[in-house]
Amino acid sequence: MSTTRQLRGGTRWALSLNAFLVYLFFYAPIALLVFYSFSDDPLVGRWGGFTLGWYRDFGENQEVQNALSVSVKVAIISTLVSVVLGTMAALALERYRFRGNRFFDALLYLPVIVPDVTMAVMMLLFFTEGLSLVNTVFGTNLAKGLATVSLSHIAFSISFVSIVVRARLNGMNEKLEEAAQDLYASRWQAFRHVTLPQIMPGVVGGGLLALTLSLDDVVITQFVSGPGATTLPVYVFGLIRRGVSPLINAVSVVMLAASILLVVLSLVAQRARGESAA
Amino acid sequence: MKFKRLLRMLALLAAFTVVAAACGGSDSASGGGDGSGADCEAGETDGDLAIFNWSEYMDPDLKTAFTDEFGVNVTEDNYDSNEAMQPIISAGGSGYDFIVPSDYMVSILIDEGDIQALNKDAIPNIGNLLPEFASGLPFDPDATYTAPYQWGTTGLGVDLSVTGEDVPRSWGLVFDGDLAAEYNLEGSYATLLNDPRETMGAALKYLGYSLNTTSDAELDEAKKLIIDAKDRLTAYESDQYDELLVTGESVVAHGYSGNFIVQFGEAENADDYTYFVPDEGGTRWVDNMAIPADAPHPCTAHTFINFLLDAERGAQLTNWNFYASPNEAAGEFIDPEVLEDPIVYPTDTSKLEFISDTGDFEINFSDAFIEAKG
C-alpha cells in the first residue's frame, strides 16, 4: 500500500495500464473461447444466437467420451505415481549426499529442458524397441497404448514434481526432523508426522502441475499412444485440422472448468488444513 | 558455474540423440514388406481391428456394421497430417492394422518398407474399382500395396458475392492481374496452399504445362508467375483457407475439394460460394487404404478393405464424408445430389493430373517455391 502511495501519477498510471493489458492478454482469448462455445453457428468467430447444443454434442459424441476417459485415466495414474516418485527423488537429492549426487541432479532437469518433440521421438523408439524385445523374449503380444502413454507422462512429470517439492524442502528447517528423531520417532514416523505435513503444499502443488501437464500434452502422447489410447487434446488437435467447430470450444471450456475446480479445491484443502492446525 | 552445468546437460542430450539415432537406424533396416502378401482368405479375421485414419473420414456406422458382421471389435484413432502418422508407423510396433496415407506418402511408406503387399485373393471386391484406379496409380504403379479409399481435387474456392456469378473458371483469377481486376478482385484477396507441389503445380497448369514437369525452364516460368502474383496474395495457407474464405478474409482460395464442400455446407449464405477445378486443369489426389508391415491382424485388415470396397459400403462412405468414391459399383447407391455435385465429381476429369514423385527433381520444386515465396 505504502509503495503505491509513493508512486507519482504518471508511473502509477503506466503501471495500471500495463497490469490491465497483461490481464487482457491472458484472459481475453479465454473469454472469447467461452463466449463462442454458446454460439449457434458452426463457424467459430460468428455469433449465431445462444445455444447449449455444443455441450450436448460433447455429452453425446462417443469418440469425445472415449478420449475424455482415456485422458482422465492417464492423468490420475501419472499424477499419483509421479507425485510419489518425484517426492522421493526430491528427498533423496535434498537430504542426502552421495556419489553422483550432482549428476543425478542434472539428469532430473533434463526432461524439463529437452524439447517435447525430441522427448517424444526418444520415447517412441524406446517403447518400440523395448516392447519388441519383451515380446520376443517372453513371447507376449504387448503393444503401445494406455500403459505407454501413462509411463511417458510419469517420466516427464517426475522432474516437475521434484523441482516443486525440493523448493519446499529447501525452505524447511532440517532441525525439525532431527528434533523428532531425538524424541524417538522412527525415520518413517518423522517423515509422516513432521516432514510430510511441512512439504505438503509442495507435494500438492507438484501434483497439480503433473495433472495439468498430463491433461495438456499433445506431442509426446501422439507419438507413444497406440490403438484406442487417444487422449482428449490429441483428439481435439485432429479435429481442428478438419475445421474449427464450437464443439472444440465446448470441450475446452469443460477442461478449463475442471482445472479451475481442481485449483480451487486444492486451495480450500490447504486453507482448511492450516486452520485446523492453528 | 551455471554455464558448466548447462554444458554438461547439452553433452547428455547429445549422447541421447546418438543412441536414439542408432536405434532408429537398426529399426528401419529390419522392418519391411516382403511383397508376397499376407496368407489370408477372403472373409478371414485374425483378431480385433485397429484403424489409424484422418479425423471425420470414417462413418461410425460402418465400424459398427463390421463388428456385427464379423464379430471383431473396431477401434479408431486419428491423425491430422501424413507427417504425424508416418513416424508412428515407421517406428514399428504401432499396433495398427489399417492406415489411410495420401498419394505421395504411399511412395515414402513403400520405400521405407513400412506397408505390406496386399493379397488380392482376400479382397475380391477390388474388382469394383474404376479401371483408372484399379490399374495402379503413380505412387503405387502396379497397385501392389494399396487400394484407393476416397479421392478429390485441388482447385479454387471463390466468393461469388464479390466477383459476380459469371466468374471465369481459370487460375488467371490469381495469376492474371488484369483478368482479376475485371471481377472486382483488387488489393490482396487470394490465398495459395503452402505446399510446393500444389502451388507450383497450379502455376504450371495455368501456363499449360504438366504439373509433373522436370523442365527447369518451365518451373522457372511458374516461379516468376507466383512472384508477380505476390501483391494479390493475403497468405500461403494450407489449413484454414476455407474458413478465411467464408469469413470474408479472402475472396479466392486455393484448396482441396472436400474441405470446401463441408465449409460451404455450414455457411449461412452457401450459394455465395463455389469451388471448381480451373479449365486449365488441376490436381487429383487419392487417399489410400494400406496395411502396416507389422500389423498384428493383417487378415482382419484385408477383410475390412474388402468390406469397404463393397458397392453399398463404398456408397455409404461417400454419402457420409462427401469425398468422391473410386468404386465404380458404388455409383448406383450414392445419393444423386452428391453424384451430380460438380464439386465432388468434376464433370471433366481429363485435365486432372496426379502428383507423381519426380525423384531427384523434387528438390527443384521446393527450391522454386521457397524463392517464389520470397
Image (cartoon, grey):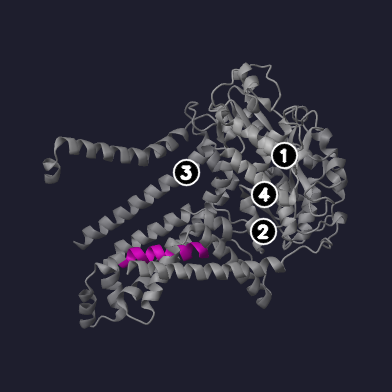
Quarter occupied by residue A207: bottom left
Quarter of image, res B320: top right
Q: Mark 1 points at which residue?
A: B217
Residue receiving disc 2: B89
Q: Mark 1 lies on which chain?
A: B
Marks 2 and 4 close (CB-CB < 8 Å)? no
Q: Which amino acid does label 1 sit on?
A: Ala
Residue B195 visible in the current orientation: no
Mark 1 lies on a secondary structure that is helix
- Give the labeled residue for mark 4: B363
Q: In which quarter of the image is the C terminus of chain B?
A: top right
Q: Nearer the viewer, residue B9 or A276?
A: B9
Mark 1: give few (<14), some (14-19) or many (20+) Cα within 10 Å.
few
Residue highlighted by disc 3: A252
Q: Earlier in the sequence, mark 1 or mark 4?
A: 1
Q: Which residue is drawn at 23% across and 83% down?
A: A184
Q: Earlier in the sequence, mark 2 or mark 4?
A: 2
Chain of the residue that carries numbered disc 3 in the rendered image: A
State yes or no: residue A159 in magenta: yes
Q: Are marks 4 and 3 on the same chain?
A: no
